[in-house]
Image (cartoon, rainbow, N blue to C red):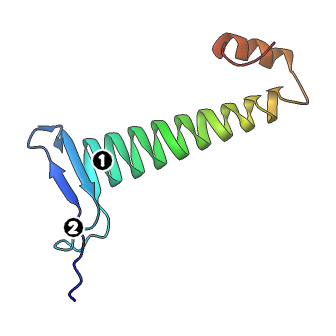
C-alpha cells in the first residue's frame, strides 16, 4: 500500500497592500516546496506560523497576534508577549492571564509595578496577603470589574 502525504492549504489573495497580500493562508505541509509547516505572510495571516498585521497561528507575530505563542502589540495566546498580553502566561506592558509579568500585571500569579492576583508581587500590590492603598485606587480606576470590595 502506497502512503500518501497530506497536502496542506495554501491560499493567497491577489490584492496587495504595502507589498503584502491582503490575506494569506498557509497551513500544513507542502511537499512540492519541501515545507513541513505553512508560513503565512500578509495583512491578515493565518497559518502554522503567521506573520502580519493580524496574525493567527500556532506561532503568530503581528500588530494583533492570536496563537499558541503570540507576539504583538496586542497578543492573545498560551504564551503572549506584547504591549497588551492576554494569555496563560502573559508578559508585557499590561499583562492579564494565569501567570503574568508586566508593568501592570493581573493574574493568579502576578509580578509587576502594579500587581493584582492571588499571589501578587510588586511595588503596589493587591493580593491574598496584602492590599496596598495605591494599588487599590489604581485597579478601581483602570479595572473597575475586578473584585476590590
Question: What kind of element bears circle 2?
Answer: loop
Residue depth check, mark 1 versus mark 2: number of the one nearer the observer: 2
* Outermost bottom residue: 1
Q: Which residue is drawn at 30% across and 47% down?
A: 46
> Which percent across, then down, holds residue 18?
18, 37
Q: Which residue is drawn at 68% across and 32% down?
A: 105
Q: Is residue 125 left or right of 5 when viewed as pictured?
A: right
> Which percent across, then down, holds residue 32?
16, 73
Quarter-of-image position of residue 95? top right
Identify the mark nearer the N-term, 1 or 2.
2
Q: Distance between the residues labelled 1 and 2?
A: 16 Å
Question: What kind of element bears circle 1?
Answer: strand
Q: Nearer the viewer, residue 81 or 46?
A: 46
**From what the image shows, is residue 91 above or below residue 123?**
below
Quarter-of-image position of residue 88? top right
Q: Is residue 115 left or right of 52 when viewed as pictured?
A: right
> Which percent across, then down, holds residue 13?
13, 43
> Which percent across, then down, holds residue 68?
48, 50
Q: Nearer the viewer, residue 58 or 14?
A: 58
* Residue at the disc numbered 2: 7
Q: Which mark is residue 46?
A: 1
Q: Nearer the viewer, residue 123 or 59?
A: 59
Amino acid at each position: 500500500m502506497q502512503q500518501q502525504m497530506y497536502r496542506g492549504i495554501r491560499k493567497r489573495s491577489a490584492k496587495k497592500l504595502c507589498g503584502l497580500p491582503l490575506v494569506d493562508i498557509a497551513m500544513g505541509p507542502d511537499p512540492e516546496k519541501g515545507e513541513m509547516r505553512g508560513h503565512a505572510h500578509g495583512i491578515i495571516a493565518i497559518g502554522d506560523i503567521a506573520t502580519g498585521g493580524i496574525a493567527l497561528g500556532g506561532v503568530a507575530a503581528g500588530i494583533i497576534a492570536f496563537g499558541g505563542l503570540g507576539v504583538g502589540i496586542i497578543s492573545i495566546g498560551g504564551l503572549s508577549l506584547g504591549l497588551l498580553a492576554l494569555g496563560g502566561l502573559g508578559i508585557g506592558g499590561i499583562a492579564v492571564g494565569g501567570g503574568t509579568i508586566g508593568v501592570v500585571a493581573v493574574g493568579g500569579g502576578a509580578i509587576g509595578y502594579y500587581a493584582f492576583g492571588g499571589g501578587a508581587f510588586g511595588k503596589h500590590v493587591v493580593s491574598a496577603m496584602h492590599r496596598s492603598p495605591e494599588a487599590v485606587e489604581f485597579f478601581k480606576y483602570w479595572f473597575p470589574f475586578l473584585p476590590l470590595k
